[in-house]
Amino acid sequence: MELALLGGSPVRQKPFPSWPEYGQEEEELLQAVLRSRRWGGYSPEVERLEKAFARLHGARHAITCCNGTVALEVALRALDLECGDEVIVPPITFVATATAVVICHGVPVFADIDAKTLNLSPEAVEAAITPRTRAIITVHFGGHPADLDALRALALRHGLALIEDAAHAHGATWQGIPVGTFGTAGTFSFQAFKLATAGEGGIVVTNSSTIAEKVWSYCNCGRRKGGGWFEHFILGSNYRLTGFQAAVLSAQLKRLPHQTALRQRNVEYFREKLRSLDGLVLPENDPRVSNHPYYLLTLRYQPETFSGVDRDLFLRALQAEGIPAQATYPYPLYRNPLFRKESLPPCGCGKWKSDQDYETLSLPESERVCKDGIWLDHYIFLGDHPDVDDVLTAIEKVRKHSGTLVSLQETTRESKS
Ligand SMILES: Cc1ncc(COP(=O)(O)O)c(C=O)c1O
């Protein structure tokens, strides 16, 4: 059968499971908030969600806010960073992990990732520590927890705060312990594609009452819990979640264990089958990961086993077969225009001084995954084995026709030169 990219019929004829999922419980909880007329302010539904989330992550406190970006910002603000303090971050992440640092007038220092997990490499973090380092933000990329043993030990040894950006890792556990409270605080996102979603939303978890009080106050216009509505003690803003969002999220959290188990079953099936196919590698999990929610699978593409077809053309062919695979980030975060000297810093205090030269930075593992990485989203694995088989069949079909694709690639190159 001809490639769909060249007019043939696609392997996958129907859509993958829709995301997000919802049902009667979301509808009933939403209606209850509607009828209660308590839509905003200090909504009881928000408090209920915070308690449920704290329980899920074994945290003493959970404070909701309007998104995962703000969750990072308020968690960092609670550390009382001073202008120019350095915070070590990975370059393979969403921009918010690093911009939260800049917004708090700190300096993001990018350290390379571990090739297998795509998480901060503890060795690279150690090498990046200077007398100005105040904190480490580690991302649990794709839902795979970072090496929390090593990072926590490093943070303790050097007196640094450790923030876990767990935007991808709802319900993930490391050695049986939920992520989020291995360090000073953990942050989560409830944005539309996340594993629990209300379209937008975020939450900070922590075991520290001091951090929790500050975060709550920043999110509630500088008020104090139990204080008056018009009493403001510190500079905060209104970052609250509404009762409607909390209602949807309460129901979404109940779906999480079942959805996670389903994804795990399908990903393990995929992993097993993929072992006998050449050219697309799914790294093994760290054995200390005890629950991986599989937000995102990153496959490493080896063009030589596809007759030299470059990754982007392979992806176009796979997408035409009905498989919604995507390329990873186009470049590591530090290569974004934002990190050019003229764009930084936003602070006019005169003390902000960065020794970082982001423009010449090149961290090899981070560079590599932007060139050879392919993402498969979590919802692809919410179906059954025949859905996973379609992904594998499409990969094999593209391989079978890779000779044709190489000719196409060469013709395109010639016409461009
Ligand atoms: C790793 C990571 N951190 C933070 C965020 C920010 O979350 P939000 O989109 O809710 O602001 C995201 C969102 O994609 C993310 O992927």
Image: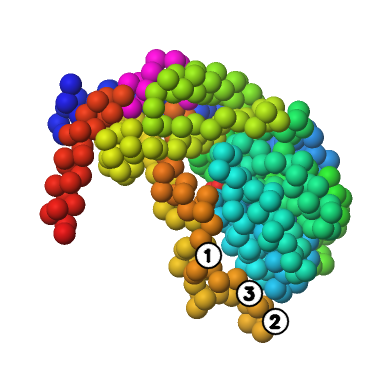
Looking at the image, which residue is at 18% across and 21% down?
A: 1
Q: Is residue 337 magenta?
A: no
The structure's colour scheme is rainbow
**What secondary structure is found at the residue carrying circle 1?**
loop
In the image, residue 38 sits, relative to residue 27, either above or below, namely below
**What secondary structure is found at the residue carrying circle 2?**
loop
Numbered badge on residue 361: 1
Residue 14 location, x and y as percent? 31, 23
Q: Nearer the viewer, residue 199 or 135?
A: 135
* Region in magenta: 381-395
**What secondary structure is found at the residue carrying circle 3?**
loop
Separation of residues labelled 1 and 2 (CA atoms): 23 Å
Characterize the local packing of mark 1: few (<14), some (14-19) or many (20 or more) Cα atoms within 10 angstroms. few
Q: Magenta region, mostly helix, strand or loop?
A: helix
Closer to the chain start, of discs 1 and 2, is 2
In the image, residue 227 sits, relative to residue 114, either above or below, namely below
Three-letter amino acid code at the position of disc 1: Leu
Instruction: From the image, state whether disc 3 or disc 2 is nearer to you.
Output: 3
Instruction: From the image, state whether disc 1 or disc 2 is nearer to you.
Output: 1
Separation of residues labelled 3 and 2 (CA atoms): 12 Å
Closer to the chain start, of discs 1 and 3, is 3
Q: Which residue is mark 2?
A: 351
Q: Is residue 288 left or right of residue 299?
A: right
Looking at the image, which residue is at 55% across and 74% down?
A: 344
Residue 126 location, x and y as percent? 72, 56
Q: Which residue is mark 3?
A: 355
Three-letter amino acid code at the position of disc 3: Asp
